[in-house]
Amino acid sequence: MVKTIKIHEVGLRDGLQNEEVIVGFDRKLKWAELLSNTGIDYLQVGSFVNPKKVPQMSDSDNLFKELKKIKHKAILSGLVLNERGMDRALDCGVELICLGVSASDTHSLKNSGMATEEALNRIISMGKELINKGNSVQVSIQSAFGCGFEGEISEEKVIKIATRYIDEGLFNISLADTAGHAYPEQVKRLYDAIKKMSADTILTAHFHNTYGLGLTNCYAAIESGAEIIETAFGGFGGCPFTKVAAGNVSTEDFVSALQRNQKRNDIMVDPIIDIAKESASILGRSTESYVSKAGRIKY
Amino acid sequence: MVKTIKIHEVGLRDGLQNEEVIVGFDRKLKWAELLSNTGIDYLQVGSFVNPKKVPQMSDSDNLFKELKKIKHKAILSGLVLNERGMDRALDCGVELICLGVSASDTHSLKNSGMATEEALNRIISMGKELINKGNSVQVSIQSAFGCGFEGEISEEKVIKIATRYIDEGLFNISLADTAGHAYPEQVKRLYDAIKKMSADTILTAHFHNTYGLGLTNCYAAIESGAEIIETAFGGFGGCPFTKVAAGNVSTEDFVSALQRNQKRNDIMVDPIIDIAKESASILGRSTESYVSKAGRIKY
């Protein structure tokens, strides 16, 4: 059975968090409203992290609160790394709370101040608490395909984390290629392995385009059961605490590719391209998306 | 059975033909010698076209003649579009003669002065003559996945051309995505259809990266039986007679991806990156390859 591929737009969070130019609140709110009504399925509005460490995300609480008052079609998600962030997310009425742990101890320490095992225990505890309270939760495994600091991340370690998630009743799992080291055969092995653990699993994929394999890895993940793909307008992005921070797969490129095959024709690509271009101009850089340079194929 | 994927490096031809800066003969010869000894399987040295129309290719004859005197591991190929070009190629001792026809009448007229059907008849006639003389021949179908001028190219038309090739004993077939419009499901359909026509078929793939799907389409073609992938150092390239000319899949990116999966570790990537960077500097542009920007993954 071919399922409909869902889009989780993470540009406002992953796309902007590493950019030096701070985008103003009103503009972010405008982009969020526009994006949430393009037909994409999930919109990551921001993260609940230390505003001193990631100043670009300091207005996440207010963005959610304002956005909740406005008509929005997409489900609004937010990234949470610790208990304090969880409380803030709950206070804002975040509709999908994304928790995550890095499979790389070095990356985990830089990102959350905890090694993988400790972070995992706390994430699982938070995830269970949230689900018990009736919240929607996604749990991710960052640096799942390799790490800029540590190099290879063993597939056994990633599978062990996924097994813990599933054993604890956390079935909505995202594998994130923070460093952009993934290659398609590896992607298929990991998604195949996790997919067969439980029929309840919902798999998400999140790839960075460091080596140009972002779209390739998305297709590999879909072949092996991923249903939700995380992408960012403009192909912006990169973790502030990784080594070579390359952009996410661009939303407009990925949706355009799906539409070449007559899938997801319900998503409006032009407004996403417009936001990518506007943000490029504000950030003082160019977009990383191909379709915004070459123009859409119209046939 | 998983076959070894072979690399046909086309940077000296497709990569340079659309660049305004003319690369000097000695430098091209140096690059050709280096490339031919990196472990790649085929090296396209140039094309035998009208030097007034494509000045960058005016030294192809001399390049072949000099290169033939030097130790070279790769099989040397050259592109031929008409009888005059064929005679020149034979005179130079080209080791694999690449003939081609465009599936788009508009592109065919611009590229060869003939519509598809007329060009096809002449290409087939030349191909048979060359094979009878004992030469190795590849026949391609350009604009096989869409055309910047005409838009959609029907899969039936492409399959019909491939059927003609196979019926006439021309089994070494390349599908080229001149405009970069291909998407993976389409790639699989076309390769699957042609692969099953004859057990003797050897399939080659040639993708441009206009929409960022170049590598994705390479993997799709391989899954459906392609054995030879045409790539260009630096990701340079583009047909002078197409509408939006975007670069080829970059050799260093594709080989690096294969090597992530422990394939083709016999190919030396560093000299290819060096040539890409040197050529970028001479052409006054930047490379289109990811690995030359991010640095190789060394583990």
Image (cartoon, coloured by chain):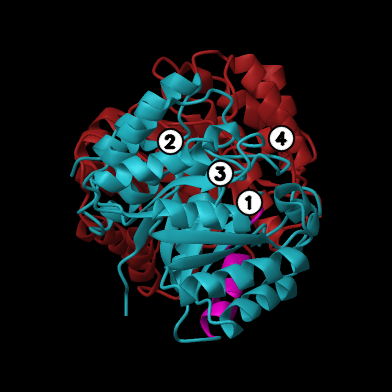
Chain colours: A cyan, B red
Task: Identify the residue shown where x is 60% and y is 40%.
Answer: A246
The residue type indicated by label 3 comes to Thr
What is the magenta range?
A180-196
Left or right, residue A287 beside residue A260? right
- Which residue in the structure is indicated by mark 1? A178
* Secondary structure at numbered mark 1: loop
Discs 2, 3: same chain: no
Q: Nearer the viewer, residue B188 or B211?
A: B211
Q: N-terminal of the two: label 1 or label 2?
A: 1
Mark 3–mark 1 distance (CA, rounded to whole Å): 27 Å
Quarter occupied by the N terminus of chain B: bottom right
- Chain ID, mark 4: B
Q: Which is the main secondary structure of the residues drawn in magenta? A: helix
Discs 3, 1: same chain: no
Quarter occupied by the C terminus of chain B: bottom right
| Residue B134 appears in view | no
* Secondary structure at numbered mark 4: helix
The residue type indicated by label 2 comes to Gly
Pointers 1 and 4 in contact (C-beta within 8 Å): no
- Chain ID, mark 3: B
The residue type indicated by label 1 comes to Thr
- Which residue in the structure is indicated by mark 3? B231
Q: Which disc is residue B273 wearing?
A: 4
Q: Quadrant of residue A123?
A: bottom right
Q: Quadrant of residue B224?
A: bottom left
Left or right, residue A120 beside residue A293? right
Task: Identify the residue shown where x is 28% and y is 40%.
Answer: A33
Mark 1–mark 4 distance (CA, rounded to whole Å): 24 Å
- Chain ID, mark 1: A
- Which residue in the structure is indicated by mark 2? A234
Mark 4–mark 2 distance (CA, rounded to whole Å): 27 Å
